[in-house]
Image (tube, grey):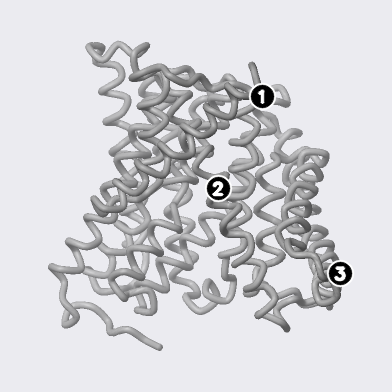
C-alpha cells in the first residue's frame, strides 16, 4: 500500500468513528456502539470501502492495550473493599453463571468444540465498567449503596476477566485446553502481577523526578506509552496476552493503587492524576481504531440471515448473557428494587466483551457466523442496560432505595 493511501484510510477511520460516536452520544447510547457501527458501514458489511489491513490492525492492537491500561488506571481496590462482601458475591456470581451458561449454550445445545464454547462463555463474563459508571454518575447514584456494590463488582469482574482472557489466549495458541497450559498461565500471571507493580512504581519515581527537571514538553505521554508497550512485550514474553501488560501498567500507576511494601505512588496522587490527564488524549485517539476494526472484521453479507441457526444462536446467547448477570444480586440481602438495578447494571459487555470476541476471531477459533452472533449480543446488551437502568430508577423512587452516602 502506498503511504498516501494509508493516510487517507486512517483519516476516514478516525473521522467516521468520531461522527458516529457523536451521533450515538446524542441518542443517549454508548459511544462504543457508534464506533462499532462506523466499522460496519466502512467495511465489507455495507460499502466495502476499507479492508482490515495489517497496518490498521497494528494500530488497533495499540488501541486495545491502551484501553486496558485505562481500565487498570481506573481500577479502585479501595472501592471494592468499601463495598465488601456483597460486591464479591455479585462479581463471582456474575462471572461464574454467564461462563457456565454461555459454555452450555455452545457445547451442549449447539455442539461446538470445547475451546469455542469456552470463548463464548468467557465473552459473556465481561462487564463494561465504563458504561455502568457513566450511567450511575449521570443518575447521581454512584455513591449510593447499590452504586458502590455495582462498581466494586464490575472492578472485580474486570480483574477476573483479564485473567480468563490470558487463559483463553494460551489455550488458543498453546495446543488446546490442558491443565499444564492453565497452570503455566496462572503461574506467569501471578508472577507478572507481583513484579509489574513494583517495576512500575520504581519507574514512575524516575519519571516524576525527570519531569520536575526537564524543559522539553511531552515527557509524561512519551515515557508512559513506552512503559505500557514494554509491559505488553513483557507480558507476551511471559506467556500472557499483551493486553495483560497494559492492564497491569494501568493498575500499578493508578492513584488509587496501594502497594504495602514500599515504592508507593499513592503518596502523591496529584502526579498520578497528572499521568491520567496527559494520557487520555492518546488513549482516545487509538481506542476508536480498535472498535472500528471490530466492525471492519465483521462481514454481515456472508451470513445466511434466512438460516434459523444464527437467530437461535443469538437468542440463546442473549438469554444466557442477561440471566447470568441478573441472577447474581439475588444471592445478597438488599431491597428487591436494588437487586433489579444491580443485575441490570452488570449486563453491558461493551468494550471488554468485544476484546474477548476479537481475540477469538484473530486466533481463528471463532468463524464469521459465531463471531457475528456474539457481536450482536454484545451490542444489544450494551444498548439495553443504560435505558433499562434509567427506567428502573424512574420507577423505583428514593423511598424504595437506600439513600446516597457521602
| Residue 285 marker | 2
**If you read the primary sequence from the N terminus, does the residue marked by circle 3 or circle 1 appear first?**
1
Rendering quarter of residue 64: top right
Q: In the shown orientation, is residue 72 left or right of residue 152?
A: right
Image: 381 above or below 316? below
Image: 52 above or below 213? above
Residue drawn 67% across and 73% down?
Answer: 272
Image: 154 above or below 122? below
Q: Nearer the viewer, mark 2 or mark 3?
A: 2
Q: Where residue 239 appears, x then y in whole percent?
A: 78, 38
Residue drawn 31% across and 75% down?
Answer: 140
- According to the picture, the residue beneath numbered tag 1 turns out to be 176
Mark 1 nearby-residue class (10 Å; few <14, some 14–19, many ≥20): some
> Is 332 or 218 nearer to us in this picture?
218
Rendering quarter of residue 269: bottom right
Image: 240 above or below 390? above
Task: Estimate the spatial distance between the alpha carbons at disc 2 and disc 3, rounded to whole Å.
Answer: 27 Å
* Residue 323 in sight from this viewpoint: no
Task: Estimate the spatial distance between the alpha carbons at disc 1 and disc 2, rounded to whole Å.
Answer: 36 Å
Q: Where residue 1 appears, x then y in whole percent?
A: 64, 16
- According to the picture, the residue beneath numbered tag 3 turns out to be 206
Residue drawn 54% across and 22% down?
Answer: 52
Mark 3 nearby-residue class (10 Å; few <14, some 14–19, many ≥20): few
Q: Where residue 13 appears, x then y in whole percent?
A: 48, 33
**If you read the primary sequence from the N terminus, does the residue marked by circle 2 or circle 3 appear first?**
3
**If you read the primary sequence from the N terminus, does the residue marked by circle 1 or circle 2 appear first?**
1
Amino acid at each position: 500500500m502506498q503511504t498516501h493511501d494509508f493516510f487517507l484510510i486512517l483519516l476516514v477511520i478516525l473521522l467516521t468513528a468520531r461522527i458516529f460516536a457523536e451521533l450515538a452520544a446524542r441518542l443517549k447510547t454508548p459511544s462504543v456502539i457508534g464506533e462499532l457501527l462506523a466499522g460496519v458501514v466502512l467495511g465489507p458489511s455495507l460499502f466495502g470501502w476499507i479492508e482490515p489491513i495489517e497496518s490498521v490492525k497494528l494500530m488497533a492492537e495499540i488501541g486495545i492495550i491502551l484501553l486496558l491500561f485505562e481500565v487498570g488506571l481506573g481500577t479502585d481496590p479501595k472501592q471494592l473493599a468499601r463495598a465488601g462482601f456483597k460486591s464479591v458475591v455479585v462479581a463471582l456470581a456474575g462471572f461464574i453463571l454467564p461462563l457456565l451458561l454461555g459454555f452450555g449454550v455452545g457445547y451442549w445445545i449447539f455442539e461446538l468444540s470445547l475451546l469455542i464454547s469456552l470463548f463464548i462463555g468467557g465473552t459473556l463474563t465481561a462487564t463494561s465498567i465504563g458504561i455502568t459508571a457513566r450511567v450511575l454518575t449521570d443518575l447521581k447514584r454512584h455513591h449510593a449503596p447499590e452504586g458502590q456494590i455495582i462498581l466494586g463488582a464490575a472492578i472485580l469482574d474486570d480483574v477476573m476477566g483479564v485473567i480468563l482472557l490470558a487463559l483463553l489466549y494460551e489455550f488458543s495458541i498453546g495446543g488446546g485446553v490442558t491443565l499444564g497450559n492453565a497452570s503455566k498461565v496462572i503461574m506467569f500471571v501471578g508472577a507478572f502481577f507481583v513484579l509489574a507493580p513494583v517495576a512500575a512504581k520504581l519507574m514512575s519515581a524516575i519519571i516524576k523526578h525527570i519531569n520536575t527537571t526537564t524543559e522539553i514538553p511531552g515527557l509524561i505521554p512519551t515515557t508512559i506509552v513506552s512503559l505500557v508497550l514494554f509491559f505488553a512485550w513483557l507480558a507476551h514474553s511471559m506467556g500472557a496476552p499483551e493486553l495483560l501488560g497494559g492492564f497491569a501498567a494501568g493498575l500499578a500507576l493508578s492513584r488509587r493503587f496501594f502497594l504495602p511494601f514500599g515504592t508507593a505512588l499513592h503518596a502523591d496522587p496529584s502526579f498520578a492524576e497528572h499521568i491520567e490527564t496527559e494520557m487520555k488524549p492518546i488513549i482516545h485517539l487509538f481506542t476508536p481504531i480498535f472498535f472500528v476494526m471490530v466492525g471492519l472484521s465483521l462481514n454481515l453479507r456472508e451470513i445466511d440471515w434466512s438460516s434459523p441457526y444464527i437467530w437461535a444462536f443469538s437468542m440463546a446467547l442473549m438469554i444466557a448473557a442477561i440471566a447470568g448477570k441478573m441472577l447474581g444480586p439475588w444471592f445478597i440481602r438488599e431491597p428487591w428494587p436494588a437487586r433489579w438495578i444491580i443485575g441490570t447494571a452488570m449486563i453491558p459487555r461493551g468494550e471488554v466483551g468485544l476484546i474477548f470476541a476479537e481475540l477469538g476471531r484473530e486466533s481463528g477459533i471463532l468463524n464469521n457466523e459465531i463471531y457475528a452472533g456474539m457481536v450482536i449480543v454484545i451490542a444489544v446488551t450494551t444498548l439495553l442496560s443504560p435505558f433499562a437502568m434509567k427506567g428502573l430508577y424512574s420507577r423505583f423512587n428514593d423511598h424504595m432505595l437506600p439513600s446516597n452516602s457521602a
